[in-house]
Image: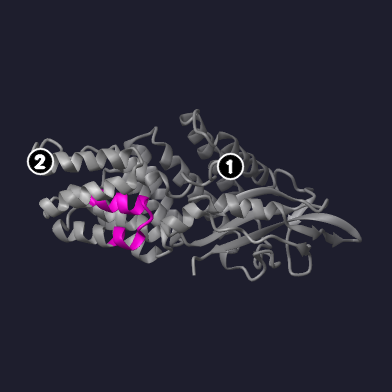
Amino acid sequence: MRKPLMKIFLLCCFFSLIVGMRSSTYAQQSPQANEKERGIELYRKGDFSEAVKTLKVAVKKQQGDIEAWYYLGLSLHGAGKIKDARKTFEKTLSLNPDFARGYAAMAYMQLLGDDNKGAVKNAEKALALDPKSVESLYIAGMAHLREGAPAVALARAEDALKIKPDYPEAFILKTQALINMFSQSRANLSKSPGRFEEGKATGEANGEVRKRSDYSLLKEASESLDAYLKLTPDQSEQALWREQLEGLRIYARMAPESNPDTSVTRMTPTLRPTILSREKARYTDAARNAGVRGTVVLMVVFADDGVVKHILAIQPLSHGLTEEAIRAAREIRFTPAIRDGKPISVIGMLEFTFNMY
């Protein structure tokens, strides 16, 4: 069974990153410190419920222990107690307003909950406190990306790579930022009135001019994703990442100067497929437990043979939601667009919105 496609693509790597950070308070040998360490170890092993119980005892005994409160927040989130986790991170920051990891954790929580403005604010606070932290740069970049500022996200990724050239998550951030810059350069597709929302047809509103620079962004994105794959050869989702990489390369080859006679054209209000059937993307249990909300946006080719092909995530979500959107996209059945009496392939967008309520 495949694991969720975008767990690392967006944000899920965050908790695995922060677990490896060294704690300045681990050297304490008091009873509450030992209890705290047991709770942290339980968290690292994924036993979130027991970690919560143990860390609650630790913070009750030592109410000013920032590290214990911080890991309690992580454990609560892992156990699916979203509201309690946010309150715990707020408590952590009230104890120490200069705790960079606390702001990064809050930004992560807000990103999952689709509070992008709040995520940007807290991610930048984390970065201001710790400008050399590649983890903070990654979170800040993802926050800006979700807020619709891919150029800022790209800058954060490049800053992280200057500090740590082999940092895999920075390549993922860079890849996604470049893809989003391509999307924006092609008439701000994320606001186009012609796209598909859960299968409802829409197309590109202002995509008449396709510039060389637009497609060079996709080429650079494919190079960045290729670098990520080389850095993570044992990643369990290699096949799925390579599928995304192939999609990037295919779209990059569609540049007018590379292939002026391509049989794939852009979708317009008068040149579009007719949807015959579609499936609704399912909310995953993992996403529900983590409080993930938002919209997955995919670029696809509605091919002349009636099959959705070359699916590329323009705006992904974590915890299996992007994979669910891709699955639902593949199930769409349609009559191809027609030009001069013949079926043709067109590029379009698909949206899948996930909301718990």
Q: Please give the name of the residue rendered at 20% of the width and 60% of the height, measured from the top-left corner.
A: 91
Front position in the image: 344 or 97: 97
- Disc 1, SS: helix
Residue 98: x and y in percent read 17, 54
Rendered residue at 75%/48% (across/down)? 260
Q: Determine whether 190 is above or below 221 in the image.
A: below
Kindly identify which residue carries mark 1: 219
* Residue 240, x across and y down, in percent: 59, 39
Residue found 33% across the figure and 46% down from its top: 48
> Would you say residue 83 sits in the magenta stretch?
yes
Q: Nearer the viewer, residue 303 or 51?
A: 51
The vertical placement of 231 against 298, above or below, is above
Kind of residue at disc 1: Lys
Disc 2 and disc 1: Cα gap in Å? 56 Å
Q: Amino acid at mark 2?
A: Pro
Q: Nearer the viewer, mark 2 or mark 1?
A: 2
For the record, the magenta segment spans 70-86
Mark 2 and mark 1 lie on one chain; the one further toward the N terminus is: 2
Q: Residue 31: give its label.
A: 2
Helix, strand or loop for disc 2: helix
Image coordinates of residue 189 in percent, x first then y, are: 60, 63
